Image (cartoon, rainbow, N blue to C red):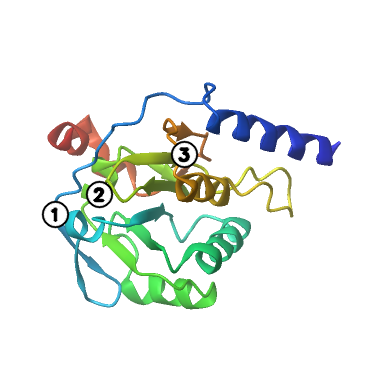
């Protein structure tokens, strides 16, 4: 039964890439990621400059949420696509100390920069509150994928890697629509940041 469910997940996802509807909007959604952010190493990251000319992956996660199997899928994708794709982790909200995030990154051997989105500006730009959520932006700054890292088909199983499938599609140069999948409802930051929707109204 589990094998059948995995097959269904893969089939649905692949159908989406050849033009059917698992999506909410068409291509042409060019992003303008304005602003300067600091990463975990203290470097300043100007995203609008960094995403020019190469595919970028933004992985929003909360260190307090259990995403061990998703992290395995991320590391596999970094190994497969890391030479041509820039990966960024994003921790929003400023509720975790840098030392805590560094310990988490080292524990899970994450080999990419982690952006500290203390004031949830980047989360607001990309309209995400829950995670783990992945955004794939191609070399033309067009958003190509938004959603889950894997299907998480069962406890103790990684499931289908949506991240890898999406990266393969982008790398192939297919003229595809924006793919979207459902994301687990683990909050990326405390609700206090969203009181009255002020943050999201300001940016959007």
Q: Residue 75 lies in what quarter of the image?
A: bottom right
Q: Residue 99 lies in what quarter of the image?
A: bottom left
Q: SS of the residue at dot 2?
A: helix
Vertical arrangement, residue 116 with respect to residue 40, above or below: above
Q: Residue at x 22, y 76 (%)?
A: 42
Residue 121 place in picture, x, y as percent: 21, 48
Nearest to the observer: residue 94 or residue 80 = 80
Q: SS of the residue at dot 1?
A: loop
Residue 101 place in picture, x, y as percent: 39, 70
Nearest to the observer: residue 91 or residue 26 = 26
Q: SS of the residue at dot 3?
A: loop
Residue 88 place in picture, x, y as percent: 36, 61
User: Quarter of the image containing the N terminus?
Assistant: top right
Disc 1 target residue: 35
Nearest to the observer: residue 95 or residue 105 = 105
| CA distance separating discs 1 and 3 | 30 Å
Q: Residue at x 18, y 32 (%)?
A: 204
Q: Are marks 2 and 1 in contact (CB under 8 Å)?
A: yes
| CA distance separating discs 2 and 3 | 27 Å
Question: Which mark is first along the chain, 1 or 2?
Answer: 1
Question: Which mark is first along the chain, 3 or 2?
Answer: 2
Q: Is residue 194 left or right of residue 137?
A: left
Mark 1 surroundings: few (<14), some (14-19) or many (≥20) residues within 10 A: few
Mark 2 surroundings: few (<14), some (14-19) or many (≥20) residues within 10 A: many
């Amino acid at each position: 039964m589990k094998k059948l469910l995995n097959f269904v997940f893969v089939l649905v996802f692949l159908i989406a890439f050849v033009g059917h509807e698992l999506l909410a909007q068409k291509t042409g959604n060019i992003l303008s990621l304005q602003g300067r952010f600091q990463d975990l190493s203290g470097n300043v990251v100007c995203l609008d400059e960094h995403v020019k000319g190469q595919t970028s992956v933004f992985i929003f996660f909360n260190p307090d949420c259990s995403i061990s199997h998703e992290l395995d899928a991320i590391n596999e994708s970094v190994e497969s696509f890391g030479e041509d794709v820039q990966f960024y982790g994003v921790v929003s909200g400023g509720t975790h100390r840098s030392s805590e995030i560094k310990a988490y990154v080292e524990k899970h051997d994450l080999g990419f920069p982690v952006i500290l989105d203390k004031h949830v500006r980047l989360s607001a730009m990309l309209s995400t509150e829950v995670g783990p959520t992945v955004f794939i932006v191609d070399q033309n700054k067009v958003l190509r994928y938004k959603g889950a890292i894997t299907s998480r088909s069962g406890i103790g199983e990684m499931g289908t890697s949506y991240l890898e499938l999406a990266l393969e599609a982008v790398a192939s140069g297919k003229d595809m629509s924006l793919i979207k999948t459902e994301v687990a409802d683990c909050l990326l930051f405390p609700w206090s940041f969203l009181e009255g929707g002020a943050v999201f109204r300001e940016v959007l």
